[in-house]
Image (cartoon, rainbow, N blue to C red):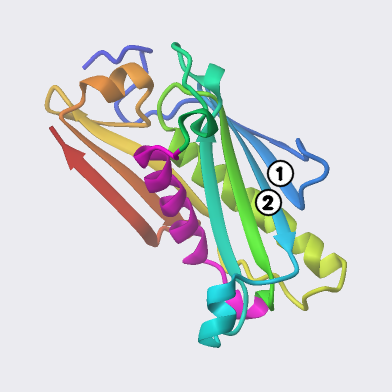
Amino acid sequence: MNRIDSRTDEQLRPVSFELGIAPYAGGSVLVTVGNTRVICGVTVEENVPRWMKEQGVTGGWLTAEYSMLPYSTQTRKPRDIAKGRIDGRSIEIQRLIGRSLRAVVDLEKLGPRTIWVDCDVLQADGGTRTAAITGASLALAIACRKLVREKKIDASPVRKLIAAISAGVLEGQVILDLNYEEDKLVAVDFNLVATEDGEFVEVQASGE
């Protein structure tokens, strides 16, 4: 099958990472996957959510937020604050990011702290959630190493790095790393999250 950008079925788009893109964050990464670009920043707060205190839950917490900047798509995407609500897709994606990262973090080692992971899409050409997960994992590892250097924790709570990729079925063929035009055409699409040693963390699948 001839793909839109001439890749083979299993060929990924070029991937790059720029570290330290946001100096005030504990860890930050600009991840580029083809024409998709996402900034992932991690900040640490020295407290935990109220529900943890009320329920007597020990350790720390990690949560994620995801947004697409208005100019990240070919037609302007209104900001959530202008609409007065977060759209359902963004809620789904930020929950996916948070779940995926918590699966590889020992929250007890974090102590009574909250890690905020913010993923902002600068340019969207398919695979924004998978790029966000991959970049966020790296930014999180950097932020936790900083906590160790500052002697706030004894060891990094990050057990493993994770990465994510999309896949889809187009014209009866399975293809990897869908760009936007391919994502519109596939009959079935998947989002796969796995650890650095190949253990699956999350699998999402949908069909039309």
Q: Nearer the viewer, residue 84 or 39?
A: 84
Left or right of residue 41, residue 123 in this image = left
Please determine whether, in this image, residue 45 is positioned above or below residue 43. Answer: below
Q: Nearer the viewer, residue 28 or 8?
A: 28
Q: Is residue 50 visible?
A: yes
Q: Position of residue 194 (x, y in %)?
A: 42, 55
* Image-quadrant location for residue 24: top right
Say whether residue 87 is magenta: yes
Image coordinates of residue 77 in percent, x first then y, are 46, 21
Q: Earlier in the sequence, mark 1 or mark 2?
A: 1
> Closer to the camera, 201 or 92?
92
Q: Residue at x 58, y 69 (%)?
A: 61
Q: Mark 1 highlights which residue?
A: 28
The local secondary structure at tag 1 comes to strand
Residue at 66% in and 49% down: 139
Q: Residue at x 72, y 60 (%)?
A: 44
In the rendered image of this protein, does residue 91 appear above or below residue 146?
Answer: above
Figure quadrant of residue 153: bottom right
Closest to the observer: 151 or 172? Answer: 151
Q: Which residues are magenta?
A: 85-109
Q: Residue at x 51, y 59 (%)?
A: 101
Q: Name the quadrant containing residue 185.
A: top left
Alpha-carbon span between mark 1 and mark 2:
6 Å
Secondary structure at numbered mark 2: strand
Badge 1 density bin: few <14, some 14–19, many ≥20, Cα 10 Å = many
Look at the image and tell me in which quarter the N terminus lies.
Answer: top left
Q: Is residue 41 left or right of residue 83?
A: right
Q: Position of residue 170 (x, y in %)?
A: 18, 25
Check disc 2: other Cα within 10 Å, few if <14, some if 14-19, many if 20+. Answer: many
Q: Label 2 belongs to which residue?
A: 42
Against 81, is 171 above or below?
Answer: above
Q: Amino acid at mark 2?
A: Val
